[in-house]
Image: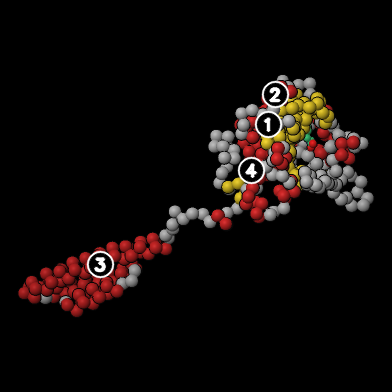
Amino acid sequence: MNDLRDKYLAAIAVAADESALEDVRLAAMGKQGEVALRMRELGKMSPEERMVAGPALNALKDEITSALAAKKVALADAALDERLRGEWLDVTLPARPRRQGTIHPISQVTEEVTAIFADMGFRVAEGPQIESDWYNFDALNIPGHHPARAEMDTFYTHRAPGDNRPPHVLRTHTSPVQIRALEAQGAPIRVIAPGRVYRADYDQTHTPMFHQVEGLAIDRDISMANLKWCLEEFVKAYFEVDHVDLRFRASHFPFTEPSAEVDIRCSWEGGTLKVGEGDDWLEILGSGMVHPKVLEAAKVDPTQWQGFAFGMGIDRIAMLKYGIPDLRAFFDSDLRWLRHYGFAALDQPTLHGGLSR
Ligand code: DAH
């Protein structure tokens, strides 16, 4: 029986994985295995021979069985070690700052504004950047001959010769989203609409594409007082200060009556802009009570509903809060500028967690 023992113990020792080991087990201990065959031979032996061969065969069986079990454990341990080596990950390694992108100040400020107005119950609404002249102008009480159309330096799209429909425009403001949101939802409504707008203009404070956020609140009894409170709350939260002086200046927009422009108290000492102190004022938004004709254009009954709207320059308030002197740099894609003014990607602005830290 020593030949059998040597053969199978050697085979177990070299079995490289669990399936090779299983082959060895079947060859030795399976129903047709060599040990089983030997067991069957016991029947043909004389009682004397069987007295010797029986216990020896049982001992061999036990020895092979325990060698198989030990090898099985060893193979499983080795497989686990191998997997642990392959899947090893050092979670304490720091991020590679050079490879980390940053959040653009415009995106950051849009998130901040959204967080503040969401807290006051405003939902985010959207509209297309290529807009019909109905939504961009007519529905907002700016008829074809109105000087506001010329003032806005509008980009028009091309129409094929002979096509006499009015051309589409790149929206010159976010105000058309007022109409689209009212059409979609009706009154009452509270929405803000941040997004890109376009005008043919280019200097230190104007770029042909820039950003606005529109606000609209319509209900049965909304007044200028609600507008004033909302804007004051917004400005304090946004600039992260307890007090800000705002100045409401009577103004005119075709889509509001009465209308007001809002300035914020600031100082320009030493070339840096400081919000909340000093003798200068900086205009940040236009606003007013939504004109009845605008409500009518959006199929909302102006004898039942009224409310306020405002339109604010996102780039403007971003420059103000983060001390960015030149608007054009926002859109230069200069990596050094982006690293300097960008925000950490994982710091989501929230009111409870802090807007900008
Ligand atoms: N749409 C105006 C602009 O682009 C800004 C504005 C003024 C929006 C008054 C309003 C508003 O909603 O009520 O200059």
Q: Residue at x 58, y 48 (%)?
A: 345
- Work out how far the residue at label 3 is from the one at label 2, CA to CA, in angstroms: 83 Å
Is the residue at mark 2 in contact range of ligand 1, meaning its CB lies under 8 Å from it? no
For ligand 1, give the image quadrant: top right
Residue to which mark 3 is pinned: 68
Tag shown at residue 226: 2
The residue mark sitting in front, 4 or 2, is 4
Closest to the observer: 51 or 127? Answer: 127
Residue to which mark 1 is pinned: 277
The residue mark sitting in front, 3 or 2, is 2
Q: Can residue 27 be seen in this snapshot?
A: no
Closest to the observer: 298 or 44? Answer: 298
Tell whether 68 sits left or right of 351: left
Q: Residue at x 21, y 72 (%)?
A: 35
- Earlier in the chain: of badge 3 and badge 4, it is 3
Q: Residue at x 33, y 71 (%)?
A: 16
Tag shown at residue 108: 4
Q: Residue furthest bottom?
A: 3
- Work out how far the residue at label 3 is from the one at label 4, CA to CA, in angstroms: 64 Å
Is the residue at mark 4 in contact range of ligand 1, meaning its CB lies under 8 Å from it? no
Instruction: Decide: few, some or many residues near mark 1? Use Cα within 10 Å; few <14, some 14-19, many ≥20.
Output: some
